[in-house]
Image: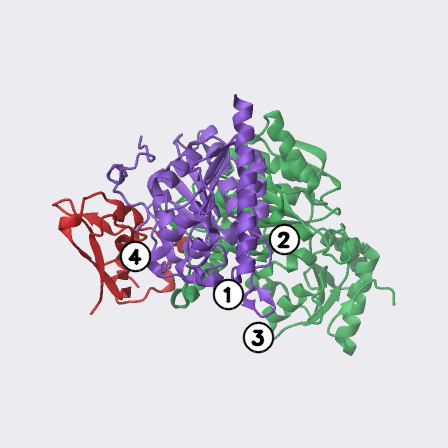
Amino acid sequence: MEKFSVFAPKLVTKKENFAPGHRACVGCAEALAVRLSMKALGRNVIVVNATGCMEVVSSPLPHTSWFVPWIHTLFENAGAVSSGIESGLKATVRKGKRQPQKISVVAMGGDGATSDIGLQAISGALERGHDFLYICLDNEAYMNTGIQRSSATPYGASTTTAPAGKQSIGQITWKKDMPSIAAAHNIPYVATACPSYPFDLMDKVKKGAHMPGPAYVHILSVCPTGWRVSPDLAIKIGRLAVETGVFPLYEVENGNYRMTLDMQELRPVKDYLKLQGRFRHLSEETVNEIQQRVRHDYAKLKEKIECTQKRKS
Amino acid sequence: MTQRVGIEVSRAVAIAAKLANVDVVAAYPITPQTHIVEDLSEMVASGELDASYIPVESEHSAMSCCLGSASVGARTFTATASQGLELMHEVLYVASSMRFPIVMAVANRALSAPISIWGDHSDVMSVRDTGWIQIFVANGQEAFDNILCAFRIGEDRAVLLPVMIHLDGFQLTHVIEPIYLEEEDKVEKFLPPNDYPIPLDPDNPVSMGAFGPPEIYSEIKKAQDVALTSSKSVILKSWKEFGDAFGRYYSPLQCYRCDNAKVLLLAMGSFSETAMSAIDAMREDGHKVGLIKLTLWRPFPFAEIRDAVKDAEVVVVFDRALSFGGPGGPVCSEIRSALYDLEKRPKVIGFVGGLGGRVVSAAGFREIIEQGTKIAREGTEQEYEMFGVRE
Amino acid sequence: MTESEKKPTWRDIEIGAIIKEPGSAMQYKTGDWRTQRPTYYHERCIKCGLCSIFCPEGCIKQTEEGYFEADLDYCKGCGICARECWTKAINMVEED
């Protein structure tokens, strides 16, 4: 079994389960996230894709980038379709209509499909305890339809439906904490990941797929087009998101919090913000506001981790 | 030995699904369908039915679960009504265009607002164009029988389309009727196991639901329409097989006392049986009237309709749904359209009634036929007539 | 469309418009999207393979000598490999 946390790229399978030729933008870290996830998952999976960037770029008739069975239906129902597939497989195997076979059911949806329009279906699927993995590919806006805001858009970011202007700083609400919402369903496994830490991402996806019951992995996917950055910077910016504490990497296993990468000292948030065109309009005051909030949220997360450690000792 | 029992029609529908040995039931409760899904979950809990029952959190998710389940080749069943049918509206189009053989019982109920739990056909009429095979049943036996036929039809490799069985909310779902409940082994003989041709499977990976650019979309839609239209031959064949196995035969429409009838009433669902009493009474008084009871709604039976009305002078169509600001009765407008190009065609008069659970008695139907005949003779300013509304 | 010049008729469509050929997107060469292209200093390359991990297209392959190079049929020229390479063994140059 491949152990991805060993930092050895050459040990990772060379097999591509997500074919090039897809129509993703130049430098798209979401496509990279999918590619890496598929390496971790192998080919004994059924992928359920919500409408969004990855679905569109990977399946323009008559082409598909998928080497695994794949289904896309609508925008908000990846959680429900996965539930149906999981139950259908279980029932047909139990009734002897199908050979038993280890098949992972993996749903993939963007931040729009996950924390907005599809929230209900995911909540239902998590509550019912279906054995599946939900991967949220978070590029922090409805990128596929033209960079419109979602509830995952960070405070102060400019999007086409919450643009920066004289009367507005852009997004006036703070990013919805979707991993916490998933964890509140008391599911066995919740994790955050970023393709800038590829081995960690692959480890977490694999762990989530093999964990019995529902699992949720939230992947920060840098979008050069929507975040207004140069296409070669996606990995660097993802790394900065983690190093500044904007997007901490952690796991929640049966309610127990564990930090993946504990930053002894967080880098200043402006190192992250200044590289992105969507934050270009921010005043020093707003940047400070963001800095306060990031520190506050990071401290809250560390509290949860300490609670876990106390409970275990 | 096949039992004939007095049983609530909802329960008979659930039993039919059980006899069909469904694999997955994904449903959300809504009056007046609740007894169907409650019974099915009881059967699963007791072990009487080996199926996965998914207690979904909404009808949109119910139908979405059905998509998933059907995509891996599981025999899939659900039921809904009214607002639930509306909530799953976009998913219905996906079920038919992606060719998933899902069977759904619809307990026809009025649409909000105002909220009404009682029966009419407004929910059905809003899903006319969704690409599903749609069958109306008029009594409990028809409901039981057609649920079984629905699986046979939908899962046929030449069809692969989802099927709706429409039964009147409360007026059918909650009445007790004498129904022959067939035996499991006889049903098993009639209904082969679901053999979906290309289910999702790592051994043969396919991509379902790719996006269709303008260069290909029209061709895909034409293929879908051809599939629905040509499913009629499989529907007729399945009904024949059912009749041969169980002794009850179904057809796209039934003509009741239509020989030498000058005026025909056309109705769907359980009210058509009430209308039969009106026909009997009027015949006794010497009026040459008859009834067309429409069973197959989609694919629309153009040939059978044209043939049934060819000797009539007037066809009075009774709708239990209202198309606001339009032609009034949706069924009436489809009948008119089906007959328009004929050299010789009857006058078509539309009545809308029975909305939101309002009952129409046999005497009421007599009035409708008489009024319709009068309008055919004298003409009218209105596009359609509303029956039973207090002016 | 596919290699055939003829466009499919409604009869040619698979049931439910499914795509039966896995990975058929490889027929579409995204290489012509590029405005810049990776070039390699082999003497600096330590053959770690990190560039191939970070490529969003998954088009960086190991050559017979063990170096990692982008398949120019698919390389979109994003420059992530050049930026992430530890030893600066990759340099992006403008496409002619």
Chain B visual colour? green
Which residue occupies the foreground of this view, B224 or B59? Answer: B59
Q: Quadrant of the C terminus of chain C?
A: bottom left
Q: Are marks 3 and 2 in contact (CB under 8 Å)?
A: no
- Residue A64 is marked as none
Chain A visual colour? purple
Q: Amino acid at mark 4?
A: Gly
- Residue A21 is marked as 4
Which residue is rendered at x = 79% and y = 57% of the image?
Answer: B278
Q: Are marks 4 and 3 on the same chain?
A: no
Q: Amino acid at mark 3?
A: Asp
The subunit letter for the residue under badge 3 reads: B
Separation of disc 4 and disc 1 at Cα? Answer: 36 Å
Q: Which residue is label 1 attached to? A: A281
Q: Amino acid at mark 1?
A: His
Residue C17 placement (x, y as % from top left): 40, 56
* Mark nearer the N terminus (3 vs 2): 2
Name above or below for residue C85 compared with residue C36.
above
Is any part of residue A28 visible from this angle? no
Q: Are marks 2 and 1 on the same chain?
A: no
* Secondary-structure class at tag 1: loop
Q: Which residue is label 3 attached to? A: B341
Q: Are marks 4 and 1 on the same chain?
A: yes
Q: Are marks 3 and 2 on the same chain?
A: yes
* Secondary-structure class at tag 3: loop
Judge the density around disc 3: few (<14), some (14-19), many (≥20) Cα neighbours within 10 Å. few
Q: Amino acid at mark 2?
A: Leu
